[in-house]
Image: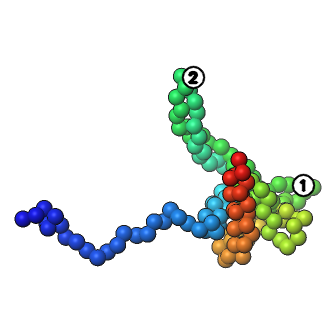
């Protein structure tokens, strides 16, 4: 008897490759991750704690070998305080993300406290999940990719 005949075959196909995600889906995912990180950072700031995330990078030793190192770093906040009011300046690919129709206004007035910043960040998150920022995020992602390919 043949060895291959001992196997049981089925008509179930392997799942499609999920690595190839559309530009929009990748941009939304990255932006939502960033907003979630900022929400956690604001919650920690309200509680008087320090919020850190783990970053991975390579370090070259004295003998020339490269090794992977993880490091705890504080995320760069996208909110700031000016004259007693808090503002949120969302970014994608390290460039300002102008959400309103007026391109000369890159920040959002959140309010007088960090709780207002938290509400504003959650509102932005809901807008992204609802698809209201799809065109803006996709355009920003394409522009970021073009900036990277020029080098």
For label 2, the crowd category at 10 Å Cα-Cα, with few meaning under 14, some 14 to 19 and many 20 or more, is few
Instruction: Look at mark 2 in the image and give the residue it sits on.
Output: 62
Q: Above or below — where is 20 with respect to 76?
A: below
Rendered location of residue 7, percent (x, y): 18, 67
Q: Residue at x 6, y 65 (%)?
A: 1
Q: Is residue 57 visible?
A: yes
Query: Which residue is at 61% across, 42% downward?
Result: 72
Tell me the CA gap for discs 1 and 2.
45 Å
The image quadrant that residue 38 belongs to is bottom right
Q: Residue furthest left?
A: 1
Q: Callout 1 environment at 10 Å: few (<14), some (14 to 19), or many (20+)? A: few
Asked whether the viewer can see residue 36, the reply is no
Provide residue 135's location: percent of width, then percent of height.
72, 72
Question: Helix, strand or loop at disc 1?
Answer: strand
Residue 82: give its label. 1
Query: Dot 2: what SS?
Result: loop
The numbered mark, 1 or 2, whose residue comes first in the sequence reads: 2
In the image, is 6 to the left or to the right of 56?
left
Q: How is the image coloured?
A: rainbow
């Amino acid at each position: 008897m043949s060895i291959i005949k001992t196997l049981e075959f089925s008509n179930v196909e392997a799942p499609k490759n999920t690595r190839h995600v559309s530009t929009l889906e990748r941009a939304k995912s990255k932006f939502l991750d960033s907003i979630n990180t900022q929400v956690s950072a604001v919650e920690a700031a309200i509680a008087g704690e320090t919020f850190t995330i783990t970053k991975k990078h390579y370090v070259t030793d004295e003998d020339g070998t490269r090794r992977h190192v993880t490091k705890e770093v504080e995320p760069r906040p996208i909110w700031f305080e000016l004259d007693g009011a808090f503002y949120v300046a969302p970014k994608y690919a390290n460039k300002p993300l102008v959400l309103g129709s007026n391109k000369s206004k890159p920040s959002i007035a959140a309010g007088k406290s960090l709780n207002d910043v938290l509400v504003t960040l959650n509102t932005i998150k809901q807008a992204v999940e609802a698809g209201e920022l799809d065109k803006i995020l996709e355009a920003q992602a394409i522009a970021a990719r073009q900036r990277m390919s020029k080098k």
